[in-house]
Structure formats: C-alpha cells, structure tokens
C-alpha cells in the first residue's frame, strides 16, 4: 500500500471520525491533523484520531506537503481556500480529497487547480453522515457505517492513490456512489439542505411565537421533536452550504412554499386527499428502499 | 370503584390501546367494543383489548346504554356523530369521554348535548400518543406511558366518574394536563397538525419531482426520513382534523410559508445567521424541557 502519511485538515466531528475510522480499518501510518481550534485538535489527539498535531497553519501546510493523502474536513468555503493554498505546493503523486457538503464549486475548482499532469489529484467527496451537533468529542469510527459516501470525480482519470482511498472508505462501512456534481447539489438540496432550512425556519418561528410557553413544551411530542431537531445545527457550517448551493436551495424552498399554500387552500377540499395519497405512495416506496438497507 | 362496564367505540390503535391499558391498570370489569371494521374489532378481541364485541351498530348503542363509561375513539367527525346519537339515550350517572385530536367543536357540542342536570357527563380528552400507522394490531398497553393526556373540560363540574376515569389515565402512565379548548387547538396546530401537513406536502412534492429516482433513495438519510415520516399518515384521520381545526392550521401554514420565503430571500445575507441563532435558542430550551421528561 502506498498511503503511509495522511493529513486531516479540520479535526471536528467528521475529520476526527475519519481518523478513528482509518485506525479501525487497519491504517497504521501517520495521521497528522490541524484545526484552527486548539481544543478540537487536542481532543482529536487525545482520542487517537490524530497521531501528530500541527503546531500552526504554516506547519499544517508543511505536513500536507509530506503526505500521500490530504483530507479537507472543514466547511466548504474553507475547503476552497485550502485548495488554493495547497495546489502550488503539492505534486503529482499526492491525492487531496474533501468531505464538503456541496460539490459543484469544489469540483469546478478541482478541475482548475488539480487533476493536471503536474498537479496533485483531487477527488471531491461527501460522506452523508453527521450529527446535529459537531465537535471532535462526538467523533466515532462507526460514523460512516452504512452511510453513503458520495464522490463527484467529474471526468478525471482515477489514480492508484484514489483507488486506495476508495478502498479505505469501503472499509469504513460506507456505500460508495459516484455522481455528477450538479446532480449531487440538486439532490442534496432536496434531501439535506431543504430539511435543514425547514427545521431552522420552523424552530425560529416557534421561538418568536411562543418564547418558552410551558404548555407548548408540555404538549410537544415526537412530531415536534423531529421537525425541530436540525434547528440545533450551527450557522457556521450551513452558511457555506447556503453560499455555495444558493440557487438549488432557493428552488426547493420556493417549491415547498407553493406546495404548502396549495395544501392550505385545500384543507377542506378533495385535493387534500390527493396530497395524502401521494405522500403515502412516496413513503411506501421509501419504506421498501429503507428495508433494503443494512441499517 | 363505580366503573364496572366500559364501552369503547372504535377499536383501532387508540381504542384498542385504551382497552389494553385498562387491563394493565387492573380494571377487571367488562370492556365492550365496537368498530365499523369487523377485522379491527376481531383483532381487538383477540388481543384482549375488548372482552365483548357488539354485533352491530344498534347493539353498540345498547352496550353504551348499559355502561358506566363510554370512550369514543373514532375520528373527530364520527365522534360528533356518536355524541348526537348517545346524548338522548344516556342518563346522569354515566360518563362519555373521547380521544379526538381537535377539541373546540367537540367541547362545544359537549356543552349543548351533555353536562346538564339530566344528561350524562362528557369529558373531552386527547392523549398525545399515536403511531404513523393505525390499526388495532399495533395497539399496546404502554402507548400512553409518559405521554401527555389533555382534557378540555370547559367550566363543567367534575363528576365522581370523571375523577375515577382520570385515575385510570394516570395509571396508564400519562401526565394529565387541563387546557382551554381553543388554546388546545391552537397549540396542537403548531406541534402536531402543522408538522403533519408539512410532512405530507413535502412527501407529495418529492413524489411529483422524483417519482422513484434511485439516486434520491440512495442518498436520503435521517433528515429525509424524519421530515417525511408522517407522510405515511392516513387521510381518513386527518381529513377530520383539517375539517374541524381549519383556521388555526391555515394560520400556522401561512406563517411558515412566509418564514421560508424570508429565509429563501436571505440565503446569502446576515439574516440567515439570525434565523439559525433563534432556532438554536429554541432547541436549547427544548432540550432542557425534554431532559426533564421521564421518557
């Protein structure tokens, strides 16, 4: 195996979990790590996700220069920034990959900055895994088990390093799926970004409407809990998603607004039955799909 | 104890669970049952939720006439219909209660038809428990454990039968909360009916947009699953909720539509941060409230 040294940039929930999953998968080489937050980096070292901590940003760049694989596990805009910084420093037998939530801008930058004869290779990736709260302390090797790990390689030619990295991802327990970057961003707008925005908007609306009314709290059950769960998600991560996938997210929001208005105008009409029947149909095909999943 | 005979009208998920919970709570008297669906009634008898099955609608009315307590566990419009049929047949030492999801119309009807000197007593109730699918086969004695059981008694004077019924509900493991009927319907619109309509609208929209696209199915994770879970709910039950709580549901839908539009127009502006911060605040007070719950 040619991967001996890996550097993880950003040792929060995902980055630290990658480190732990690599160890679980049998990787015995060096895992260097860097995080802007000294606390996050220290936690990652303490839990064994990282075996060598960069002492500062400059040192992190140097560790990347000496690594076979660099994993960018920071928010999307920071990934784009690291790509700019790393491209001129790396050479053709190195692989950079990322775990960013949106892929069109990153894949576009990868074609410009990497994947040429004399540059390093870049494999845009996105594990569909996470928790509503972040941070290294919640990291676990099993985070990617039974999750889908998406790649949007575009038309680049796969390097042997890339094949090796994909083997590790499969060992993490993830199911790998290659997608076109634009299709990725459209699908993720529907299945991830829209549910997030919905939960944020609903939670904020409830705060404005009820503050901390005790009867609302007493009555709220599973439906309220599930519909507001993602309201805990941090702005710091979602700002970048909103910035780099604006048009698809806006399109899904608008479509949902119109659909809610349609339902509102038909609360007492037969069209309500049609909406419920369509929803039942969507769920019954989903249930089939879900029962086929190992989780 | 004066409750010896109970009749449950509607032996689906909730009605059959009431029967099972009564047995678990030590009730040894007769539990008569009736359901329009012979299969549901048979299942309820088979699992021990009902000890005597009415043979037809007329027989069900007769069994009610001979019961101390009648529990109406059918959809809201059917509850209103049973109230009309039962009121002239019952007398002052009987109690009727219900488990309907909306309370304004039922409480209003109760003031007209019951709760007078020579009529039976009516206690409007609503256990905040259920599953996304209905049916007696899913019934369980523990369904109401740690759930909130709401009552909207209005200004009626509590009978001793009512006190005894409340004792059973407490034995089911429910936390009892008395509320004004209009407040009940407003709060339930927010915490239950709006999440339902949202999940229905989103699921129906996904069906129209993607049919059964395999990549959508492969990518969808917990966020999609939770946001569409209630899409499985049956129209038959929600039609009555929409019919009897139309204005509050429409108001919550409109408020959410406007909030989503606000968020959509601010995907790249600092207002997005404010929405996330408000949502975080709502969730952090919720988390406090939830950690105080026994479940």
Image (cartoon, coloured by chain):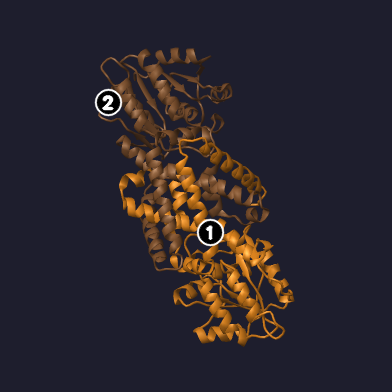
Chain colours: A brown, B orange
Subunit bearing disc 2: A
Question: Measured from the top left, where is residue A285 in percent x and y?
Answer: 35, 55
Along the line of sight, the residue nearer the viewer: A135 or A182: A182
Task: Provide the secondary structure element on which disc 2 rests.
Answer: loop
The residue shown at (55%, 33%) is A138
Question: Eyeballing the image, is B198 above or below B77?
Answer: above
Task: Provide the secondary structure element on which disc 1 rests.
Answer: helix
Question: Eyeballing the image, is B142 above or below A172?
Answer: below
Q: Are marks 1 and 2 in contact (CB under 8 Å)?
A: no
Image quadrant where residue B276 sits: top right
A155 displayed left or right of B150 = left
Along the line of sight, the residue nearer the viewer: A262 or A123: A262
Along the line of sight, the residue nearer the viewer: A145 or B237: B237
B11 displayed left or right of A89 = right
Question: Eyeballing the image, is B162 above or below B211?
Answer: below
Question: Eyeballing the image, is A117 above or below A40?
Answer: above
Can the viewer see residue A196 in this picture?
A: no
A106 displayed left or right of B8 = left
Question: Measured from the top left, where is residue A272 in percent x and y?
Answer: 42, 64
Image quadrant where residue B274 sits: top right
Image quadrant where residue A258 sits: bottom left
Subunit bearing disc 1: B
Q: Quadrant of the N terminus of chain B?
A: bottom right
Can the viewer see residue A291 in this picture?
A: yes
Graded by Cα atoms within 10 Å as few (under 14), some (14 to 19) or many (20 or more), the crowding at tag 2 reads few
Which label was assigned to residue B110?
A: none
Question: Measured from the top left, where is residue A141 in percent x and y?
Answer: 48, 32
Find disc 1 in the rendering and name its residue: B251
Find disc 2 in the rendering and name its residue: A158
């Amino acid at each position: 195996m040619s991967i001996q040294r890996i550097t993880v940039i950003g040792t929060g929930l995902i980055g630290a979990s990658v480190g732990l999953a690599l160890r679980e998968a049998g990787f015995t080489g060096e895992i260097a790590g860097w995080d802007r937050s000294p606390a996050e980096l220290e936690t990652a070292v303490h839990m064994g996700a990282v075996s060598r901590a960069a002492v500062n940003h400059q040192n992190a760049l140097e560790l990347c220069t000496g690594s076979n694989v660099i994993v960018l596990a920071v928010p999307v805009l920071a990934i784009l920034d690291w790509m700019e910084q790393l491209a001129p420093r790396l050479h053709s037998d190195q692989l950079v990959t990322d775990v960013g939530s949106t892929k069109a801008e990153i894949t576009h930058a990868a074609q410009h900055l990497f994947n040429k004869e004399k540059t390093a290779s870049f494999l845009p990736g996105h594990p569909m895994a996470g928790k509503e709260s972040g941070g290294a302390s919640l990291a676990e090797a099993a985070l990617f088990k039974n999750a889908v790990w998406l790649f949007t390689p575009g038309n680049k030619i796969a390097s042997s390093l890339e094949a090796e990295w994909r083997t590790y991802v499969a060992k993490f327990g993830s199911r790998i799926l290659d997608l076109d970057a634009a299709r990725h961003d459209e699908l993720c707008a529907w299945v991830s970004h829209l549910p997030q925005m919905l939960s944020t908007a609903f939670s904020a609306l409830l705060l404005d409407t009820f503050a901390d009314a005790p009867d609302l709290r007493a009555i709220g059950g599973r439906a309220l809990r599930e519909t507001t769960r993602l309201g805990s998600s941090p702005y710091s991560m979602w700002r970048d998603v909103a910035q780099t996938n604006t048009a698809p997210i806006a399109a899904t929001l608008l479509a949902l607004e119109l659909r809610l208005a349609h339902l509102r105008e038909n609360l007492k009409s037969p069209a309500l039955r049609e909406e419920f029947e369509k929803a039942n149909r969507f769920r019954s095909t989903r249930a089939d799909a879900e029962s086929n999943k190992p989780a």
